[in-house]
């Protein structure tokens, strides 16, 4: 067990405020806001805005946003859904007429209305202390003057090079002179800087009712897309109550559908029927149970999760204890199940950013924002530097499924923020990028923290597994050989990965000691997550 929780990075602790984020420049910008008196919402959005520039392959103003926000003085706990809807012209018949069997990976037909800009504004209006213009001012220099290109970005550019080279404006912006920039070279995005300046001056209406949106519509029309002025004008965000489930005296909270967050709670409900702490943390017994519980949760997730405004999602039934018991009774402790059919809606989508913040007043925020896959649709609006996400990939074109593409409908969404409370007060903020891996990583981190008493850095660095729709089980090579062999003997198709595999996510945790006020943070070294506290 001691080797399982060995760490390369130290545990970070503070008593005033704490922030974690997926890039060092972003976490520094958020920390500067906290240091100057801004609150957790201000800091979270500032860090996000910086990452829209310095993580251009993962997030941006052309993407979607979800947040969980707990305000200490008010005692309120809100879930913000700022995901966008399909254009009115995006009918199933239109896609079938274009010859599509599934929503394409790239191009204008994989785009839904970007929701992030409206989400930032809504969060600031309801819970922030600073204006969007003030926060944009902290981000603009990284677009105007540039930031140093880093290895992860180079790898993403290599992955998408062939598509970007023929993608027009996106290729011109990210492959200057037709070449992949070298590590340390400054990446400058002047058109994006100008768009942010326009947002500073005119607010979100510059996109949903103004020139930035007009540029999107003009480009969409030029390349055969479906966007219209009405699509942007009708976009709204939704404030909802988080969905929750009890786990060993704690309240696990996440985003309601159309987010996949319910799968996290379903896994926790099944695992609560077992004494996990009685098992070895790196044992085949525990991993087998967790993987099989994940498979069962995903079967129900994939069958039911969609936009609840267009089709009811049976949340209460999915989270019932009887459902959990019925599912657990299907698990054979000695053999992998082969009969669970999982729809593979998430063929990629690991390109996402996450962050967590606690401020000096005890306000707590988790935020997740994304373009979905690397550089999203790979469509950039030439006049504005906005890269559009490919979140339409969350839809199916199966007319019999609740998640079928339809006009003005939100797709199934992988983005799933999480927070854990005790006595109605936040005690653990956690989450990760990783598409299908998000709830899998979150359940492993949560169990390490709650059942095995790991600290935040230990939980973030612990060896990790990820179960895939094709039945394979990816495992980092830091698991004991005996564990891998035992899982293979149970029938798992184990794929051994490197020790800190990027595909396993970029998890982050802040723990709040409600008695002492001490904040403890951990950040995943698998990507570029860091924490700063005071």
Image (cartoon, grey):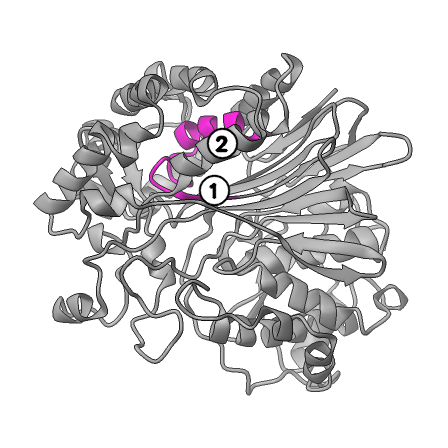
Q: Position of residue 466 (x, y in %)?
A: 59, 62
Query: SS at mark 2?
Result: helix
Q: Residue at x 31, y 76 (%)?
A: 398
- The quarter of the image holding the C terminus is top right
Q: Position of residue 86 (x, y in %)?
A: 29, 55
Residue, disc 2: 48
Residue 50 on the magenta segment? yes
- The quarter of the image holding the N terminus is bottom right
Q: Position of residue 308 (x, y in %)?
A: 46, 64
Residue 476 in view: no
Depth check, front residue: 295 or 238? 238
Q: Give yes or no for contact between labels 2 and 1 (Cβ–Cβ under 8 Å).
A: yes
Classify residue 178 by image quadrant. Answer: top left
Query: SS at mark 1?
Result: strand
Tell whether 419 sits left or right of 396: right
Tell whether 252 sits left or right of 36: right
Question: Height in image: 530 above or below 25?
Answer: below
Mark number displayed over residue 369: 1
First in sequence, mark 2 or 1: give its number: 2
Q: Which residues are magenta?
A: 44-66
Residue 107 on the magenta segment? no
Q: Residue at x 61, y 19 (%)?
A: 38
Q: Residues within 10 Å of mark 2 (few under 14, many from 20)?
A: many
Question: Height in image: 218 above or below 372?
Answer: above
């Amino acid at each position: 067990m001691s080797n399982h929780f060995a760490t390369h990075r130290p545990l970070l602790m503070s008593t005033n405020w704490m922030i974690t984020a997926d890039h060092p420049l972003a976490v520094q910008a958020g920390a500067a806001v906290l240091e100057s008196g801004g609150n957790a919402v201000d800091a979270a959005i500032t860090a996000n805005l910086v990452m829209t520039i310095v993580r251009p392959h993962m997030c941006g103003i052309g993407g979607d946003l979800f947040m969980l926000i707990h305000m200490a003085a008010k005692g309120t706990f809100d879930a913000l859904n700022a995901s966008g809807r399909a254009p009115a012209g995006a009918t199933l018949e239109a896609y079938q007429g274009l010859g599509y069997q599934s929503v394409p990976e790239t191009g204008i037909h994989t785009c839904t209305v970007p929701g992030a800009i409206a989400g930032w504004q809504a969060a600031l209006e309801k819970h922030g202390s600073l204006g969007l213009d003030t926060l944009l001012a902290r981000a603009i220099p990284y677009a105007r003057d540039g930031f140093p290109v880093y290895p992860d970005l180079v790898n993403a550019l290599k992955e998408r090079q062939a598509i970007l080279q023929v993608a027009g404006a996106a290729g011109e912006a990210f492959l200057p002179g037709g070449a992949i920039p070298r590590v340390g070279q400054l990446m400058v995005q002047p058109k994006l800087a100008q768009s942010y300046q326009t947002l500073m001056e005119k607010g979100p209406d510059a996109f949903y009712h103004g020139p930035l949106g007009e540029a999107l519509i003009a480009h969409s029309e030029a390349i055969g897309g479906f966007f219209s002025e009405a699509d942007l004008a009708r976009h709204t965000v939704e404030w909802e109550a988080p969905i929750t489930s009890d786990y060993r005296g704690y309240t696990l909270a996440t985003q309601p559908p159309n987010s996949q967050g319910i799968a996290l709670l379903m896994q926790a409900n099944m695992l609560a029927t077992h004494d996990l702490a009685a098992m070895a943390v790196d044992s085949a017994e525990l991993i087998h149970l967790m993987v099989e519980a994940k498979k069962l949760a995903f079967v129900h997730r994939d069958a039911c999760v969609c936009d609840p405004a267009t089709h009811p999602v049976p949340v209460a039934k999915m989270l019932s204890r009887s459902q959990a018991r019925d599912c657990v009774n299907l698990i054979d402790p000695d053999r992998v199940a082969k009969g669970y059919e999982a729809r593979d809606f998430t063929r990629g989508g690991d390109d996402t950013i996450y962050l967590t913040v606690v401020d000096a007043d005890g306000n707590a925020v988790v935020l997740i924002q994304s373009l979905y896959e690397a550089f999203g649709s790979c469509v950039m609006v030439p006049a504005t530097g906005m890269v559009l996400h490919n979140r339409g990939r969350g839809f199916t074109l199966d007319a019999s499924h609740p998640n079928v593409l339809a006009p003005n409908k939100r797709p199934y969404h992988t983005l799933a923020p999480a927070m854990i409370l005790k006595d109605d007060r936040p005690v653990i903020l956690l989450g990760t990028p990783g598409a299908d891996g998000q709830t899998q990583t979150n359940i492993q981190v949560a169990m390490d923290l709650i059942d095995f008493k790991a600290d935040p850095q230990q939980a973030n660095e612990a060896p990790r597994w990820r179960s895939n729709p094709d039945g394979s089980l990816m495992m980092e090579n830091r698991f004991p050989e005996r564990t891998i062999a035992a899982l293979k003997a149970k029938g798992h198709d184990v794929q051994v990965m490197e020790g800190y595999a990027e595909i396993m996510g970029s998890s982050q945790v802040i723990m709040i000691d409600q008695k002492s006020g001490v904040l403890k943070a951990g950040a995943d070294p698998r990507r570029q997550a860091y924490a700063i506290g005071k």
